[in-house]
Image (cartoon, rainbow, N blue to C red):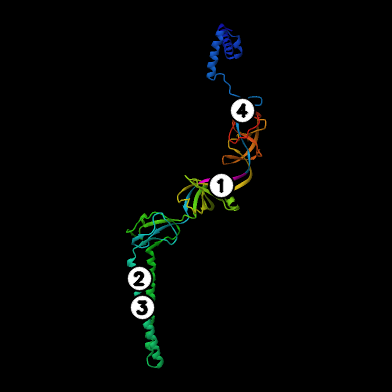
Amino acid sequence: MGLGKVAFWLVVVVAGAFGYAVMNPAMVETRAPGWTKWSDGIRVFAANHGIGAKPPAPAATGGPRANVSVETATRGPVAYRLSAVGTVQPIVSVAVRTRIDAQIASVEKPDGAAVKAGDVLVRLDDRQLVTQIRQNEALLQKDQAAVEQSTRDTSRAATLVSTGSGPTLNVQNAQTALKAAQAAVASDQALLDNLRVQETWYTLSAPISGRLGVFTSKTGNIVRAADTTANGVLTTINQMSPIYVAFPIPQVDLGKLREALKLGPVKLVATPQGGEKTAAGEISEIDNLIDSGTGTVTIRATFKNADELLWPGQLCNLDITLWTDPDDVTVSRRAPVESNSADYVFVVDDKAVAHKVKITVGRLQDNRYVVSSGLVGGETVVDDGKDFLADGARVNIKDAPGAKAAAP
């Protein structure tokens, strides 16, 4: 071995011994004062920069206690609920239009008013039609008088023929004149009935009960039946009670919803966005087609809405209860620990020792997991601080609202 290699390995050995002496606190007492001061400075520098630092080991039996928060695994009824955002829709909406060309004589209801079926909304100028009706009434009276005259003529001609004082032709002519007069009366009556039907078009009434929109034309404006623009609709009536709320649900939930409907009416609660009041309703319709683009199906629910809490076009948050499982165990969503083999939780016993318990996690409902196996309810489960625990670790339960304190 050459002198160069001997010198190299000598330096390595000396440096290693020097580093061990510097970093080993047990040798502090054997060092000279000046040496100790200098080496302590090196150790402080190394500690501040993470040199030689080791991560803390999980708390285990016999070691320091880990601080954790706990909660109690609950057992009881758990509702199977869905959440959605829906839009309020009127069941019936009617656009009020004119069937004739006329001038608006008066608007009988203010914009946005609540109306009942049959209430007068708009009156049109019907003076010309009223005059025609009177003219045809007079014509009808004239033709009715002609019928009376023909009836008398027929009777007199028949009397003369029966006594041999007149020819049969007179009777026949009188009978023909009577039939013509009767036909004229029937024609007059039909024309008069037609005019009276048209007279109703001059009074626009509400066909349904509901709430009016804004009138597009006011008193004095000319309205036309052939107007296809927005102004052709004088106003719109939306039925307010009952009313629909339409909302989409994922197609994966459609089967559960249909199963729930077989058991009875499915209740739901609607909360208008921005408000606190709620309205209760029932699901009434399922659309017959799933939207392939979104993977959702539209559902309609019916609400009585007597207080008009729900307004057409309004967005609502919906809470749909499909059914209620009578006896489920649930834990906080923070409690389960996922692993490749199985999910588990840490259960704290009366001696403040945490034990790992395998569980089977079901659905998430109201920020709590339904546990189908592994727990029976009433266990004290760690929900915060579980990342620093090992099976059999001793714990120190922190004060937390609703936490179940274990004995130290």
Q: Which of label 4 and label 1 is nearer to you?
A: 4
Quadrant including the N terminus: top right
* Chain-order first, disc 1 or disc 3: 3
What are the residue bounds of the magenta stretch?
77-85
Residue placed under numbered mark 2 in the picture:
133
Q: Quadrant of residue 355?
A: top right
Q: Specify the amino acid type for callout 2.
A: Ile
Q: Determine contact: label 1, label 2, CB under 8 Å.
A: no
Q: Nearer the viewer, mark 1 or mark 3?
A: 3
Q: Residues within 10 Å of mark 4 (few under 14, many from 20)?
A: many
- List x then y, in percent, for residue 273: 48, 45
| Sequence-first tag of 3 and 4 | 4
Q: Residues within 10 Å of mark 1 (few under 14, many from 20)?
A: few
Q: Earlier in the sequence, mark 1 or mark 2?
A: 2
Tell me residue 74's x, y (percent).
63, 40
Position of 52 compared to 116: left or right?
A: right
Spatial CA distance of label 4 from label 2 is 98 Å
Residue found 38% across the figure and 69% down from its top = 194
Circle nearer the N terminus (4, 2): 4
Rendered residue at 39%/71% (across/down): 193
On the image, the x and y values in percent for residue 360 come to 63, 39
Residue 10 can be seen, yes or no: yes
Which residue is found at the position 33% from the left and 66% from the top?
127
Which residue is tagged 1?
253
